[in-house]
Amino acid sequence: MTLNNSLREMSAMIELETRRLRHDRTEIYTRAVQPVMWLAVYGTVMSHVRDIPTNGIPYIDYITPGVLLQSTIFVSVFYGLTIVWERDTGILKRLLVAPASRYATLIGRAVASGVRGVVQALIIFPVAILLGVKFIPNPLYTIAAFLMLFMVAGGFAALSMFVASFMKTRERFMGIVQAMIMPLFFASNALYPINIMPPFLQSIAFINPLTYAVDAMRSLMISGNVASIPADFVAIFIFDILIFTLASISFRKIIE
Amino acid sequence: MVLAIDIKQITKIFDNKVKALDGVELEVNAADVFALLGPNGSGKTTLMRILTTQFRPTSGNAYNFGIDLIRNDAEVRKMIGYVPQETSVWADITGFENLLIYSKIYGVPSGSRKKIISDALQSMGLEEPANDLVRKYSGGMVRRLEIACALMVKPKILFLDEPTLGLDPSARKAVWENLTIFKKEYGTTIFFNTHYMDEADHYSDKIAIIMKGKIVKCGTANDLKQSLRSEALQFGLNCNALDKTALTKIRALDFVRDVLFHDSELMVVIENERADTALPKVMEVLMMRGIQIERIAMARPTLDDVFLKYAGPITKIPECCHQIRGCGRQIRMCGHNDVKKN
């Protein structure tokens, strides 16, 4: 019964998010501009440097999984802003008075953000193909890669809501999230391999969930070297469980 | 009979220092419309948020239809509807979609969803704009949509936090007319906070006034008004002077608190008696003395007066009514409320 309620709540949240997307697709397109620039401009320029050891993979191909993840995770990381906004209006109060568990509300929102992330990545994906990125033509691998993207996007949305439950105003929230974004992206293997980083950054990259997600997606989409895939999925799974739990516990705080 | 809402000694202290509620006791009968009045910051919203299980009281207890809302909050959430003060619908989807999402959250079975949603839209007069984005709605339409979302699941108690705040008079009227029809049909108990006295006066069965976290007065609108004991009668006489005996005789009536005469206007302030039953007795005295009456007016306190008396700034009944000149407006002021003028 309770599980049923929770699933119902989650699916309602996912439906809400997809309906919102349907009414306003502009956001999805405009958000696709930046990642496409990363590939087309940064990728093209940097591919001429040839100093970054990519194991023989063309540089644009090398960074594509990272850029796909970056574009979705940045959406997720700011998802908490929706919650801050819903807190300022009465929506959150109302949801918390509905007969659904508060965990389900939070997890539903996080999952919904994951769905949004996948849609976002699906817009960039064909553009990458047009730019000449050679993906492994294995649909199973592609599906697994998008599953990884979905899991990590949901996790970061939960992280974002966790932050939102402490930083209850837009300004404070934006401040802290802006500060999180740079190390998140640059202290990961999204743009270059970890072993060329200084040791300090390496240790950050080691605990950065994005590193594992990039590794999995790069293996599944570009390199085909799937040996570390199970470990990557386990790492992200643990990250999700941990952050969903923490965010669920602190979610109550946001309305107080 | 089980009370719809039964509040026992609820106290809420925020951050160990701000005492928002201080031993609130309140009983609301089933199927009543109950208005909670109070100035800003008096604890109205805090009380409503406790009653809707958003947070727990520091101490005390409360029951909705006998269900303990602290220990059994999940059960309580199944039978209440709630419309917060702030906008609580998603503006970037349509009105219909808002109802659809809420119907799913509340677990309305998919078979009856369509019917329930269209009934809700109809009962709030929103069929026409149902497929427009809520962003394009007017304030009154948004409010009606919010109420439709809450009514859709036929709650046993509906909590409305300042339901008509910021609406124009016709939108307010539309909201209340729709609510009244719904309430008649389903016997829903409605508990609302408001600043609008006329709303409480017209639509509620019972009113409580909250001040600094305490219920200072509770009763029907009439009870509250009578509790002021400041009804007054005003006579326009055909003479500029009144003989002393008449004045003394009127003063001697046991329900008369004060008598003023100025410029052919006679004002009689009444206590412990209703103005309409006091009137014949005063008239009798006047007629016995052969005084001709040209016109009569009765001044009864409004709910505004009640509010100002119990929840307003310092209000004292001035002793020296004699200094006040004139007409009906001032009759009310003489009841209380005009220290400054003296």
Image (tube, coloured by chain):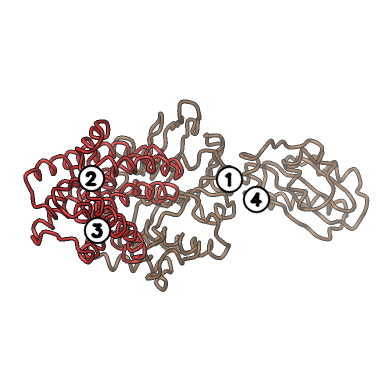
User: Tag 4's secondary structure?
Assistant: loop
Q: Give the left or right position of residue A88, taking residue B342 as reference.
A: left
The tag earlier along the polypeptide, 2 or 3, is 3
Residue occupying image coordinates x 42% and y 52%: B83
Q: Which chain is brown?
A: B
Q: Give the left or right position of residue A105, taking residue B43 as reference.
A: left
**Crowd band around label 3 with a 10 angstrom C-alpha radius: few (<14), some (14–19), many (20+):** many
User: Tag 3's secondary structure?
Assistant: helix
Q: Are marks 1 and 2 in contact (CB under 8 Å)?
A: no
> Can you tell which mark lies on residue B302?
4
Q: Colour of chain A?
A: red
Residue occupying image coordinates x 86% and y 44%: B247
| C-alpha gap between disc 3 and disc 4 | 63 Å
Residue occupying image coordinates x 70% and y 42%: B271
User: Tag 2's secondary structure?
Assistant: loop
- Quadrant location of the N terminus of chain B? top left
- Disc 2 designates what residue? A192
Q: Nearer the viewer, mark 1 or mark 2?
A: 2
Q: Amino acid at mark 2?
A: Tyr
| C-alpha gap between disc 3 and disc 1 | 66 Å
- Disc 1 designates what residue? B223
**Crowd band around label 4 with a 10 angstrom C-alpha radius: few (<14), some (14–19), many (20+):** some
Chain of the residue on which disc 2 is drawn: A
| C-alpha gap between disc 4 and disc 2 | 76 Å
Is circle 2 on the same chain as circle 3?
Answer: yes
Q: Are marks 2 and 3 in contact (CB under 8 Å)?
A: no
Q: Amino acid at mark 1?
A: Asp
- How far across and how far down the image is residue B260, in percent? 84, 45
Give A79 or B142, whichever is nearer the viewer: A79
Q: Are marks 3 and 1 in contact (CB under 8 Å)?
A: no
Q: Give the left or right position of residue A213, taking residue B67 as reference.
A: left
Q: Amino acid at mark 3?
A: Ala
